[in-house]
Every structure is written in C-alpha cells, then in structure tokens.
Amino acid sequence: MLISPFIQGIGTGAGLIIAIGAQNAFVLSQGLQKNYPLQIATFCILADALLISLGISGLGTLITQHQGLASFAAWGGALFLFWYGLGSFRAAFSDKTLIATEDSRQSLKVVLLTASAVTFLNPQAYLDTVVLLGSIGGQFPGDGRYLFGAGALTASTIWFLSLSFGARLLRPFFQSARSWKVLDLTTCAIMWSIGGSLVYKQVALF
C-alpha cells in the first residue's frame, strides 16, 4: 500500500523533469564540456528536493490561490527566458566547438550562479515541482505524500546524474561548430517558446 505513492512519484516526476527545458539544456551543454558535471547535477538535485518539499508541504496550493503572485512570477520568468534565449541565439552564430569551450571554461561560481538562474528564475520549475507535484502528492493520505515526494526526487536524482555524466557520450558529435549551432538554436527556440507561452497566458487574463 505504501509502495504505490513512491512508484507514482517516480513516474510523475520523471514525466515532468525529463521534459526539455532551460535547466536540462544547461545541464546538457555543461556535461558536454565536462564542466563540473557532479557539482551541477548535485545542485539540480538539491534544488528539486527543495522545490518538491515546498510543494508537498502545501506551497503549491498557496501560489495557485494568489493570482498576483503567480502573475509576477510568470512575467519575471518570461523576461529571463527571453534573455537566456537571446544569449543562445548569439552563441549559435559564433564559431564555437567543443575544444574551444574547454579553453574558455567558466568558474564553478559562474556555473552555479547560472544553474541557479535557470532553475529558480524559471516559473516552469515552480509549476512542475511545486504546483503540480505538490497538488498530486497532497492527494495521498498520511505519509503517502512524503513517499510520493521521495519517488519524484528519486527520478530527479537518476535523471540529472545520467544527463550530466551521459552527455559526454555525445562529445564526438559536438566536435564541430555546426552541432553546437544546432544545440544553441534549439535551446533558443525552447526558451523563447516557453517565454512566449507565459506571456500569452498572462495577456489572455486581461
């Protein structure tokens, strides 16, 4: 009986976390460069643990009940996503290769600050982990919601470790500037599409 919420947490968490987004695109690009893969994966796992815990504790319900707070987060997140996408768009037209990026490797501080931005400034992260997982987990009685949250965090842990360290298997493909151009343009399209959807939803409310 107690196993069911845990399994459902793994399935639901995997479905939401594996979806392509700002955070996953960043983890993939840093993993390709072997740029602090363990530290980045650990940060993302801890961030998910925090957000999932907040959702399970009831914060997700609080956010959905206050339209002003949700609207502020949406507009702020949209601005960040457009800015991040613009950076990827500009990078797509530079002669970036895997070897070149290794020579210009960023410091751990800069990398973690960027990871913080793509995680905590992205409203999609709050929607997925705090609101959706929190709402679903809250439906389980007793300790069921905590088992559900543990399952979601298990999925997060497996995913980010696999993405961060598994990205190196794609390194031969990203030896060319053309491959990086495709990745950067794809990242840009993802960021702008998510940002655009947030703006559209807010405009529709008026």
Image (cartoon, rainbow, N blue to C red):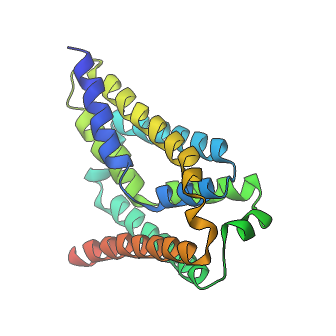
**Residue 165's x, y, as percent?**
58, 44
Q: Is residue 8 left or right of residue 24?
A: left
Say if 203 sits above or below 111 in the image: below
Quadrant in which the C terminus is drawn: bottom left
Q: Looking at the image, which is closer to me, 1 or 55?
A: 1
Tell me if 58 is positioned left or right of 96 in this view: left
In this picture, residue 129 sits left or right of residue 80: left
Pick the front one: 148 or 120 = 148
Q: Residue at x 40, y 70 (%)?
A: 190
- Residue drawn at (36%, 45%) of the image: 130
Task: Residue at 61%, 77% (x, y): give it.
Answer: 177
Identify which residue, 46 or 79, lies in the foreground: 46
Q: Residue 50 at x, y = what percent?
A: 49, 38
Q: Quadrant of residue 101?
A: bottom right
Q: Residue furthest bottom?
A: 93
Report the front residue among 123 and 105: 105
The vertical placement of 33 against 52, above or below, is below
Q: Position of residue 92 (x, y in %)?
A: 56, 80
Residue 112 location (% of width, % of height): 66, 53
The quarter holding residue 122 reads bottom left
Q: How many marks?
A: 0
**Quadrant for the N terminus in the image:** top left
Residue 50 in view in this figure: yes
Looking at the image, the residue that sits furthest to the top is 1
Answer yes or no: is residue 206 visible: no
